[in-house]
Image (cartoon, rainbow, N blue to C red):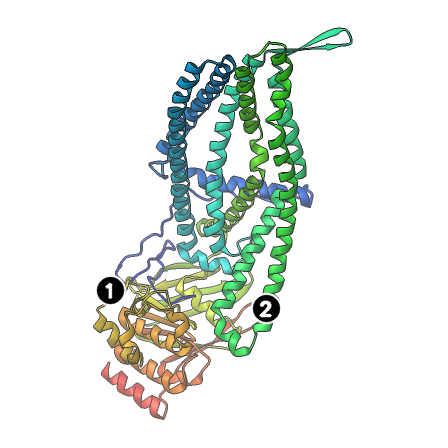
Amino acid sequence: MTDATLKPKSVDGTEEHGAEKSRPEKASTVEAAPPPDAIEPNPDLTPEEAEQARKRYLLRRFWISARRYWGGSGDRLAWPCSIGLLAMICMNVGFQYGINRWNRGIFDAIERHDAGTVYYLSAVFVPLVLGSVALVTAQVYVRMMIQRRWRSWLTAAVIARWLANGRYYQLNLIGGDHKNPEARISEDLRIATEAPVDFIAGVISAFLSASTFIVVLWTIGGALELPVAGMTITIPGFLVVTAVLYAVITSTVIAIIGRHFVQVSEVKNQVEAELRYTLTRVRENGESIALLGGEEEERNDLDKTFSNVLKQWAQLARQHMRTTFVSHGSMLIAPVVPLLLCAPKFLAGGMTLGEVMQAASAFAIVQTAFGWLVDNYPRLADWNACARRIASLMTSLDGLERAEQSDALRRIKHGETRGNAILNLDDLSVSLDDGTAVVKETQVEIAPGERVLVAGESGSGKSTLVRAIAGLWPWGHGSVDFHADRRLFMLPQRPYIPSGTLRRAVAYPRAADSWTAAEVKAALAKVGLDYLNEKIEEDAPWDQILSGGEKQRLAFARLLLHHPDIIVLDEATSALDEKSQDRMMETLIEEMPTVTIISVAHRAELEAFHSRKITLERRKGGAKLVSDIDLGPRKGRRNLIMRVLDNRR
């Protein structure tokens, strides 16, 4: 969970981010349509049938979102580019036919020793080649532009839904097949949008080529007469029949030997994503691993994960070997078949050399068209796996979105307080997504300027309650009501440090130039980080450079810049020593004496900086609020500081 400036949720359950807005604004996504209905398990199906039904649903779910690229909310260039690509495919088939006719003419001229025709056709060949090359080049450009723009549009749609209403965080709290969403959005979505464009263009090109050159084969080859047992058997269009049979045999063989390709490719992509995730965790937690000396354990974990990758690659290699055996054999045999079939008619004088070569060229084109599945089956399997993985993420987001829109599921309501209270928890119960209670029946009213300490033993639901107040935890019932037009700023135990300059890190989530350099330096100085003032414009990996305590100090500097109305501190001083903790709290209260503070902490010393303490006690069936007391005056230095600050207020 990151620290961020948030608008309290409005009555309709939406929120706005950023300090400059004053009214709640409904979070929007690229997809305006409601999520599709979830597939319900059929108890009559076997586990294998249920899994197949789930996979079919995932592919359908992917297309529900993906096809909107060509709809009213899609890209304005989607249809023009698609129509242009189709036109270029048709024109390219025309050039193929022209070159096919050229083959016939040049070989007939060579057979007749007609030098003039040979020279003429040699000159004609140049514009044919140039035109075909230019057309194919333009076709590649348009095809890749569609892929790029489609990926951009769909990525924006998925990310918008992923970031909306804290769903990127809530996915970590629910079950489902949505592990490693970053890999699904970056890699799987790329393949899922690139491959269909190639497939559709390839299928159209194959269909047009096959249709055109089947006519050529039928016209040139004519009928084949075979003497059998004193009889003559006539096979009309024997070249076409041979081409179709040849393609059917090779496609059937590849489908049989590659029937497990999709499953193997899907598992391979999953273990690759798990390896990336494991490596990322090691990098992000490098300091803790190094301090604990956990390199050997991490190495064992990485070796185990990588072994799974190698195992799946070995299975995928075997699948590729089988399909390559068929496809390469087909490629070697295909050019010879038409020559052998046409040889008897050519030797008998029934065909010219040009017709034989034209038939061989047409047969190769038809065979390539019919063998499209053979050549693209591995990639089709890879697309299948990637489309399902991104659809699994979409399905999990559907569940969260459906829960937000449904009255049947119990969710925490958010609204506005009445009277003088700045925050009101009205019969608030917090539960897991499966209904298990964490905190139940909490009734708290907080006035402006109060500083409330939430205490309780570990596991009593304090942090969960804080997340519900911030709007990140949706499950439960009751309501969290804020005073209208009040901004909330939350500081977690591990502050988020974005990439970029130190100035950007201090200003986050606002832009780096939202405050002047002098204002940023002043905020750093107030939290004891003035020694970093000369480095605020330095772009460095500050998340790795700063210690845990420095990160928490930096988070307090953000508070001073954003100056919110309500602050939620979730163990926000846990990395600081007692003296530094005192200074942070003193500075906070001195700089913002009217701010409302809600703190979750274990340290008893923090009571001196709060005016009220509520205690949660873990019980069977959910934690319960067992006490709500005012923190009376205390002797000692902290109490003196508090009285001085209160007098200044």
Distance between mark 2 and mark 1 Cα atoms: 44 Å
Quadrant of the rendering where the N terminus is positioned: bottom left
The relative height of residue 195 versus residue 171 in the rendered view (above or below) is above
* Circle number at residue 299: 2
> In the picture shown, does residue 306 fall above or below 37?
below
Residue 526 coordinates in the image, percent (x, y): 28, 80
Image position of 247 (left or right of 27): right
Q: Which amino acid does the dot numbered 2 rest on? A: Arg
Q: Nearer the viewer, residue 295 or 98?
A: 98
Taking depth in this image into account, of 123 and 532 the one nearest to the observer is 123
Residue at the outermost bottom position: 636
Q: Which is more toward the observer, 15 or 577?
A: 577
| Residue 622 locus on image (x, y percent) | 54, 68
Please identify the quarter of the rendering in which residue 595 is found. Answer: bottom left
Q: Is residue 54 left or right of residue 77?
A: right
- Disc 1 marks which residue? 514
Q: Which mark is residue 45?
A: none
Query: Where is residue 308 drawn, in percent x and y?
Result: 63, 57
**Horizontal placement of 21 versus 599: left or right?**
left
How many numbered marks appear?
2
* Pointer 1 local density, CA inside 10 Å: few below 14, some 14–19, many at least 20: some
Q: Does dot 2 land on a helix, a strand or a loop? A: helix
Q: Disc 2 or disc 1, which is closer to the eye?
A: 2
Between 406 and 348, which is closer to the camera in this rendering?
A: 348
Residue sitting at 54 percent across and 64 percent down? 437
Q: Does the CB distance between marks 2 and 1 fall below 8 Å?
A: no
**Which amino acid type is shown beneath numbered disc 1?**
Ser
Label 1: state its secondary structure: helix
